[in-house]
Image: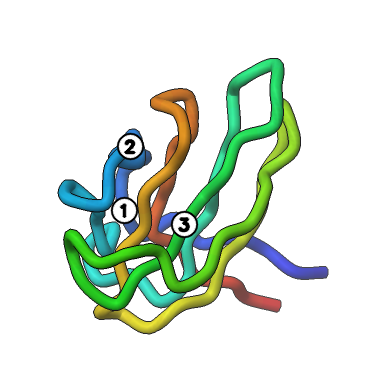
């Protein structure tokens, strides 16, 4: 059974590319969308850069994102939260 190891405190994901965050240089991020609607999370190689990749997080759901420690993320809404995590068996 896979388990989630919480490494960092949950924070709100910034909502602009200019404020994008690496989430404490995380390589694995737990993303929670507390909104009643779908939201978009975007990944960039640096703060202020255009999104390289984007994906939709369904309403009231959790997703896990694997990324480079230097990649930064931002979301379409302040209702999207993130935590630095590790996954264990």
Q: Are marks 3 and 2 in contact (CB under 8 Å)?
A: no
Residue 64, how many percent across, how many down?
62, 60
Q: Which quarter of the picture shows residue 26?
A: bottom left
Q: Is residue 17 above or below residue 13?
A: below
Image quadrant in which the N terminus is located: bottom right
* Local secondary structure at mark 2: loop
Residue 11, how many percent across, how many down?
32, 38
Viewer-proximal residue, 1 or 40? 40
- Identified at 63% across, 57% down, the residue is 55
- Identified at 67% across, 44% down, the residue is 57
- Residue bearing the label numbered 3: 42
Using the numbered discs, state the Cα–Cα distance from disc 2 to disc 1 in whole angstroms: 20 Å
The numbered mark at residue 22 is: none
Camera-near label (1 vs 3) is 3
Q: Is residue 5 above or below residue 86?
A: above
- Residue bearing the label numbered 2: 15
* Local secondary structure at mark 3: strand
In this view, which residue lies farthest toward the right?
A: 1
Please rate how many residues cluster around mark 2, counting C-alpha atoms within 10 Å: few if below 14, some from 14 to 19, many from 20: many
Using the numbered discs, state the Cα–Cα distance from disc 3 to disc 2 in whole angstroms: 10 Å
Q: Earlier in the sequence, mark 2 or mark 1?
A: 1
In this rendering, the count of numbered labels is 3
Viewer-proximal residue, 33 or 83? 33
Using the numbered discs, state the Cα–Cα distance from disc 1 to disc 3 in whole angstroms: 20 Å
Give the side of residue 56 with respect to residue 79, left or right: right
Residue 34, how many percent across, how many down?
59, 23
Please rate how many residues cluster around mark 3, counting C-alpha atoms within 10 Å: few if below 14, some from 14 to 19, many from 20: many
Q: Earlier in the sequence, mark 1 or mark 3?
A: 1
Image quadrant in which the C terminus is located: bottom right
* Local secondary structure at mark 1: loop
- Identified at 31% across, 43% down, the residue is 9
């Amino acid at each position: 059974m896979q388990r989630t190891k919480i490494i960092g405190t949950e924070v709100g994901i910034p909502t602009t590319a200019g404020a994008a965050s690496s989430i404490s240089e995380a390589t694995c991020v737990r993303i929670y969308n507390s909104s009643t609607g779908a939201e978009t999370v975007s990944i960039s190689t640096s703060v202020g850069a255009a999104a390289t990749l984007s994906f939709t997080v369904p309403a009231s759901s959790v997703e896990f994102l694997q990324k480079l420690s230097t990649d930064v993320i931002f979301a379409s809404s302040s209702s999207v939260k993130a935590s630095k995590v590790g996954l264990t068996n």
